[in-house]
């Protein structure tokens, strides 16, 4: 009650407004990062399913060379995407396990 009296009876003081803005920004950044993670996970899952379906349909039709080429092309595309990520940010390389183990 003393703090409320010292703030001239105002509930939203400068400090409280700053605190509210900070929490709103932290929440917005968290939602945005979660959305990006969800989009990457969904896209990766869809591409892996597409790779598996194309390869399986070629194998079922007896086209072994085409199945190998499709599988190799998808794998090369995934490796190239990983290379681009590491090219722009070297800390993206590795499995992430060295940060965990001691």
Image (cartoon, rainbow, N blue to C red):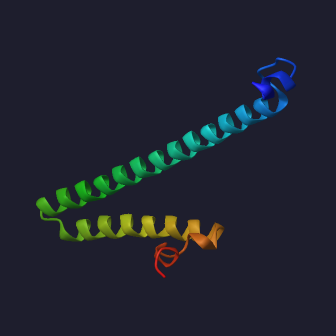
Up-down relation of residue 4 to residue 21 (above or below): above
Please tell me which residue is depicted at 18% across the width and 56% down the height of the picture.
Answer: 57
Q: Nearer the viewer, residue 65 or 92?
A: 92
In the rendered structure, the answer to whether residue 28 lies left or right of residue 42 reads right
Residue 26 in the image: x percent, y percent?
65, 42
Percent of width and height locating residue 12: 78, 23
Q: Quadrant of the N terminus?
A: top right
Q: Is residue 69 left or right of residue 95?
A: left
Dividing the picture into quadrants, the one containing residue 71 is bottom left
Q: Position of residue 82 (x, y in %)?
A: 50, 67
Q: Which residue ends up furthest to the top in the rendered image?
A: 9
- Residue at image point 49% right, 49% down: 37
Q: Residue at x 78, y 34 (%)?
A: 18
Question: At x 48% / y 74%, what residue is drawn?
Answer: 100
State left or right for residue 7 relative to residue 28.
right
Name the side, left or right, on which 14 lies relative to 82: right
Above-or-below relation of 19 to 88: above
Label total for image: 0
Above or below, 3 against 102 in this view is: above
């Amino acid at each position: 009650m003393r703090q409320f009296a010292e703030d001239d009876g105002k509930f939203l003081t400068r400090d409280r407004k700053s605190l509210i803005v900070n929490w709103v920004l932290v929440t917005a950044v968290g939602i945005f990062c979660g959305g990006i993670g969800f989009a990457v996970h969904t896209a990766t899952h869809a591409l892996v399913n597409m790779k598996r379906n194309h390869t399986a349909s070629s194998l079922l039709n007896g086209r072994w060379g085409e199945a190998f080429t499709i599988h190799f092309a998808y794998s090369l595309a995934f490796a190239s995407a990983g290379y681009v990520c590491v090219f722009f940010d070297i800390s993206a390389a590795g499995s992430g396990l060295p940060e965990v183990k001691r």
